[in-house]
Amino acid sequence: MSKNKKISTKQIVFSAAAIALATVISVVIKLPSLPNGGSVTLCSMLVICLIGYWYGPMVGIVSAIAYGILQFITGPYVVHPLQVIIDYPLAFGALGLSGFFAEKQGGLWKGYLLGVFGRFFFAMVSGLIFYTTYVDSLRENGAAIWASTLYNLSYIAPEAVITLLLLMIPAVKKAMGLLKTMAQ
């Protein structure tokens, strides 16, 4: 999308529909939540990454941030004030990074992986803040890094694997192409 090009009504409608669908999926269709937040949902991250895949990084990131704010409204889990920013607008907003691969070969899965990695990074930083509030030595901070990494991988990685396996199915791959064409 060029600098002078405005966001179209169609882009707003498709983005809003994707945000609504991802929100319903994240609230209704999920495996049991972990005790300190996070759960494996049925491809909710993919639905948000699709916005970037359809329209590029600007629309993707703005939409993903809006989704993050909606996630905070519908089910916040906050221990430290910094987590409000890191866990919601930044972590979910990172899913919009998928837009950097919108026009590339294999752009959907490459963009999805970038978005998921971005979400993992911010979730891990937020978890590090959470875990380090309970420790008082450098050695224990090392344990906090591992705790945050493993905790966040425990729900982000399974959803990513499930989604990537789903995207390998020829009918799903074809449907994603048709959706991109409809969204344009």
Image: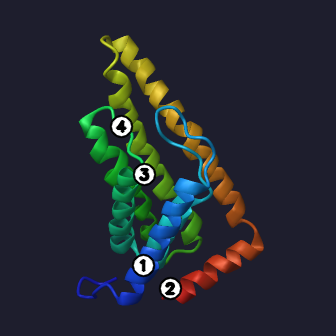
- Who's the residue at 51% across and 32% down the image? 35
**Which element is circle 1 on?**
helix
Query: How many numbered callouts?
Result: 4
The residue pinned by badge 1 equals: 55
Amino acid type assigned to the residue bearing label 2 in the image: Ala
First of labels 4, 3 by sequence position: 3
64 is higher (above) or lower (below) than 82: below
Q: Which amino acid lies under the numbered mark 1 shown in the image of this protein?
A: Tyr
Q: CA distance from mark 2 to mark 4?
A: 34 Å
Q: Position of residue 12 (x, y in %)?
A: 38, 81
According to the picture, the residue beneath numbered tag 3 turns out to be 118
User: Horizontal and vertical percent for residue 184?
Assistant: 48, 88
Say whether marks 4 and 1 touch (CB < 8 Å): no
Sequence-wise, the earlier of marks 1 and 2 is 1
Residue for badge 4: 126
* Mark nearer the viewer, 2 or 3: 2
* Label ID, residue 183: 2
Locate residue 5: give its quadrant: bottom left
What's the CA distance linking mark 3 and mark 1?
18 Å
